[in-house]
Each structure stands twice: as structure tokens, then as C-alpha cells.
């Protein structure tokens, strides 16, 4: 645990690093991110076994996740070299502006300052020490204070050492990346005025507490929390008829992978009454070996949720699965799939509808007179994803209404496929309306994630010598500049008639 008397030094070091780090040229900062990526891959044989020991995740999964983490860092490096993320806008001085004299205006984005990042348990590389939030904040030019997760403390220390050394060797300022441990240290720094933004991936309960702390500060700060998501799936009768077997096997794979401990695991799947998929689902679930849950606390919570779902009136078992608790309190789980009519699921309420973190999912069976759209609106809040399995030629008004509803309730709408396996790519949106996230206009995956740690500033009539490099006419960083030239306002409105 980080002692509270150490936090003053940590916060001040981050504050001291903020200005020189923000001033680093994009190519220099990108090389530092590449250096971190290279170092992580070079230390894979040291880090992966630690991760396996502390999380119970498989070597194949963890090596893939470490690669994803490195790729993500390099992607952000290219993003900042490109410079579009700065959103540079230059409005030339215009004495004949349509509304009167317009001054010279130059706008771009600047780093917000030190970011406190709370690491996740279920992705010990990709959403932890060197994960997406860290990569986005460093790319933006913000020092990072990383609150390590108690589920993998030794891995956190080892990974942080690799990151810090790589950044130092790349010439980044002291204090640009630091690790802390313990809830008390995390909440204390979240209240510190030198911290300018927070990010979090975890439970609704913990995330909401932290978000409220950030909002209640004398100087409130933005807090980007990813909290909870059950990721509903809707399967139509036409889709079942066309590819029912593939849907059954894909569903189980998405539920069972990494013991269901993924933020995009499909927790509820709407299927038509008489779908006939029980046997195929049970067979697919029976082919999986038991998988360790991340830690004893998660195992105990999963057992409680599984018992609640299995014991709810009107709920039947499709694949029983099971949980084995060992002498250390660790849980080893097999996928459990349950089913019930829409009416029975609604009647069971929270006993069934609450999120189950682990390899458990519920088939919600709807009849021809059931209102699936209404059920999505009434019982499922914001989600990271909603998936639609439609027939090849389904594109009628009812389907369009379903798509519209999914758009209102989720950050990513999938057609076919399954939501697990989030692509690290520029167009990815990994966020959604509350409680999926605390800020549904942002993402924690993809290049748009960098925008969370930036704020806009405009310079008015500034001398060239005092302008930041991206706003200068000479444009030494060679970033994209959107220019509004003098005289253009006199023709505004004409484009609609072209």
C-alpha cells in the first residue's frame, strides 16, 4: 500500500511533469510510446507468468492481451504524429466579417494535466498499468498516476517498472508515470487539486463512489468510468432458421471465454419461443473446461449471482455448468446458461436482471405478442453493446425500430457476430449510456479515447512568436490546420443551394 505521506511527493512530481511533458513534440512523445510497447514485449516472458499466477487467465489469452497493449500504444503514437487530434482551427482576422470585425482566432486542444487512472482486474495488461487509459493520457501529453488493482499487485509493480524505465530512457520528464496502491491512496489523490481527470474500469458501486468524489471536489474534474454492461442480444426467428447452430456455438464461446469475465459478455439473449437451441447450447457449453475466476472475491460474488438466477421462479437450466471453490477460496467455473420467458424474467426482477460477472447468461424467450423493444427500454439501461442477429432479408419498419432502440441504449451496435473481442482501431466505440459509462460521449478504446484528456483553448490576436507550434502559420509540427479565410462569411448559406 502507498503511504499517505508519499502521496504529496507523487502528486507534486506529476504536477511538475505536466508542463514539460505537454510541450514535447508529437514525434518525440510517439517514440516514447513505441519504446514502452517494445519494452513490454521484450519482458513478456517475465510478465505473462506473473499474470497467470495472479489472475488465473491462460497464457494464450495473456500473451494476446500483451500484444494488444503494445499495438494500442503504437496506434496512439501514430495518432499524435498525424496531429488531427489537436483539432486546429484558424480563423483569419476579417474586417468585413458578416457580424462585424472578426479578430484572429486560433483554437486547438491542450492536455488537461495529471490523470489518475484506476486499473481494472479483468484485463491485467490492456486495461491496467499500461492499458488503454494510460496510453490515451500519455499520448495526450498528460502525466499518469496509476492506481494498481489489488487483484494483480506483483504484476502491477513489474509492469510499472518496465513502463517507467522505458519512458525515462526515451527522455520523458520525471514524474510522468507513477504507481500507487490501496483504496485510501486512490481516493486521497482523486481529491487532490493537482489531479485534473480520473479514469476507471470496474463495478458500478465502486465507479459511482469515485465519480461522486470527482464531482464533489471544490474544483470538479472529469471522471471517465466504465462501470457495468449486460450487452443484450436479440435473435429473430429468421436468424434462428438460417443459422441456429452457428448462433448457439458462437453464443457459448462469447459467454465462456475468459470465464465470462469480459465487459462485453452477452448477459441476456432474446430468442423466439420454440427456438430449439437448447441441445446445441448445452452441447457447446459441455465442451469447455473449467476456468479459474480472477480472485476469491469475484468467485464468491459469482456463486451468489448464479444461485439467485438458478433459483428464480420460472427459470430453467439449459447448461448447468458449476463452480468449484478450492482451499484458497479461488473459484473454478464452467459456463451456466439459463432460460425463461420474457414474462418470467420480468417477474423475477433483479434476481435475474442484475449483471452476473462470470460465465453465466440468460436466454429470454419472447412470443409473437411480446414487446422486445419495450423490454429493452424498460429493463436494460445503457450498455456497451447491443447485438442483433437478423435474417438475411430483414429490413422492415419493425427492424428499423429495433436498430433505433439499440442505438439509443448502446455505444456499439453489432449485426451478427458477438461483442467480445473488442477491436483496437480508430473507429471503435467502447462506451455507452449510464451505467455502462459515466460519460457516454467518450470511448476507452480506439483513437478517439485521447479526447478525454484534452481541453480546447483559443488564442485571440496572439503574436506569431507567442503562439504554440500547432497554431503558427509556419506550422513546424506539420499538423492539419482547418482555415477560415477572410471574406468567407459573406457567402455562408450558399452551399445548401449548390
Image (cartoon, grey):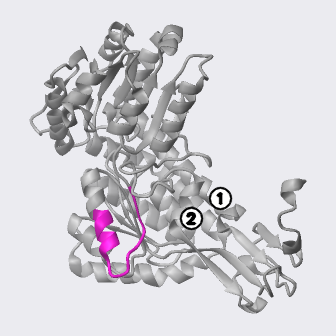
Cα–Cα span, label 1 and label 2:
8 Å
Judging by the rendered image, the residue that carries numbered circle 2 is 139
User: Does residue 69 appear left or right of residue 426 in this picture?
Assistant: left
Bin the neighbour count of mark 1 within 10 Å (Cα to Cα): few under 14, some 14-19, many 20 and up: many
User: Does residue 350 appear left or right of residue 410 in this picture?
Assistant: left
Q: Does the stretch in magenta take in 214?
A: yes
Residue 295, percent across and down?
21, 43
Q: Which residue lies furthest to the left in this view?
A: 327
* Residue 164 in which image quadrant: bottom left
Magenta residues, start to end: 210-225
Judging by the rendered image, the residue that carries numbered circle 1 is 79
Residue at x-position 35% and y-position 33%: 258
* Residue 61 in which image quadrant: top left
Residues tagged 1 and 2 counted as in contact (Cβ below 8 A): yes
Residue at x-position 37% and y-position 7%: 276
Q: Is 202 placed above or below 339 here? A: below
Looking at the picture, tell me which residue is in the foreground, 254 or 338.
338
Amino acid at each position: 500500500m502507498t503511504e499517505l505521506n508519499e502521496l504529496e511527493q507523487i502528486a507534486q512530481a506529476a504536477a511538475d511533469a505536466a508542463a514539460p511533458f505537454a510541450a514535447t513534440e508529437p514525434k518525440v512523445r510517439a517514440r516514447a510510446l513505441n519504446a514502452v510497447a517494445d519494452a513490454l514485449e521484450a519482458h513478456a516472458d517475465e510478465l505473462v507468468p506473473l499474470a497467470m499466477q495472479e489472475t488465473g487467465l491462460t497464457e494464450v489469452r495473456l500473451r494476446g492481451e500483451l500484444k494488444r497493449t503494445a499495438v494500442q500504444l503504437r496506434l496512439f503514437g501514430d495518432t499524435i504524429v498525424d496531429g488531427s487530434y489537436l483539432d486546429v482551427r484558424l480563423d483569419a482576422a476579417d474586417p468585413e466579417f458578416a457580424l462585424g470585425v472578426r479578430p484572429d482566432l486560433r483554437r486547438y486542444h491542450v492536455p488537461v494535466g495529471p490523470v489518475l487512472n484506476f486499473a481494472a482486474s479483468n484485463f491485467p495488461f490492456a486495461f491496467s498499468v499500461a492499458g488503454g487509459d494510460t496510453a490515451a493520457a500519455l499520448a495526450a501529453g498528460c502525466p499518469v498516476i496509476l492506481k494498481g488493482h489489488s487483484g494483480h499487485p506483483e504484476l502491477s509493480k513489474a509492469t510499472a517498472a518496465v513502463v517507467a524505465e522505458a519512458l525515462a530512457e526515451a527522455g520523458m520528464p520525471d514524474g510522468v508515470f507513477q504507481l500507487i496502491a490501496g483504496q485510501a491512496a486512490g481516493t486521497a489523490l482523486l481529491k487532490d487539486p493537482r489531479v485534473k481527470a480520473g479514469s476507471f474500469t470496474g463495478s458500478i458501486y465502486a465507479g459511482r463512489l469515485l465519480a461522486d468524489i470527482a464531482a464533489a471536489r471544490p474544483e470538479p474534474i472529469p471522471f471517465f468510468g466504465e462501470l457495468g454492461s449486460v450487452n443484450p442480444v436479440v435473435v429473430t426467428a429468421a436468424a434462428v432458421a438460417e443459422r441456429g447452430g452457428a448462433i448457439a456455438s458462437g453464443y457459448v464461446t462469447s459467454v465462456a471465454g475468459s470465464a465470462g469475465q469480459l465487459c462485453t459478455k452477452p448477459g441476456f439473449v432474446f430468442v423466439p419461443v420454440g427456438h430449439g437451441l437448447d441441445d446445441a447450447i448445452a452441447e457447446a457449453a459441455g465442451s469447455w473446461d473449467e476456468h479459474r475466476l480472477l480472485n476469491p472475491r469475484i468467485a464468491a460474488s459469482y456463486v451468489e449471482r448464479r444461485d439467485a438466477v438458478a433459483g428464480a421462479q420460472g427459470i430453467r437450466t439449459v447448461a448447468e455448468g458449476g463452480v468449484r471453490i478450492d482451499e484458497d477460496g479461488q473459484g473454478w467455473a464452467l459456463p451456466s446458461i439459463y432460460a425463461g420467458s420474457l414474462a418470467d424474467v420480468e417477474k423475477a426482477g433483479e434476481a435475474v436482471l442484475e449483471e452476473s460477472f462470470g460465465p453465466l447468461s440468460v436466454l429470454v424467450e419472447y412470443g409473437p405478442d411480446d414487446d422486445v423493444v419495450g423490454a429493452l427500454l424498460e429493463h436494460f439501461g445503457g450498455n456497451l453493446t447491443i447485438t442483433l442477429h437478423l435474417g438475411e432479408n430483414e429490413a422492415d419498419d419493425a427492424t428499423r425500430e429495433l436498430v433505433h432502440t439499440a442505438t439509443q441504449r448502446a455505444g456499439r451496435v453489432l449485426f451478427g457476430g458477438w461483442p467480445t473481442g473488442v477491436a483496437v482501431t480508430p473507429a471503435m466505440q467502447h462506451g455507452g449510456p449510464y451505467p455502462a459509462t459515466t460519460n457516454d460521449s467518450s470511448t476507452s478504446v480506439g483513437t478517439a479515447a485521447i479526447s478525454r484528456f484534452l481541453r480546447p483553448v483559443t488564442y485571440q490576436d496572439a503574436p506569431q512568436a507567442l503562439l504554440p507550434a500547432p497554431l503558427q502559420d509556419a506550422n513546424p509540427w506539420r499538423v492539419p490546420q482547418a482555415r477560415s479565410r477572410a471574406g468567407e462569411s459573406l457567402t455562408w448559406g450558399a452551399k445548401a443551394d449548390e
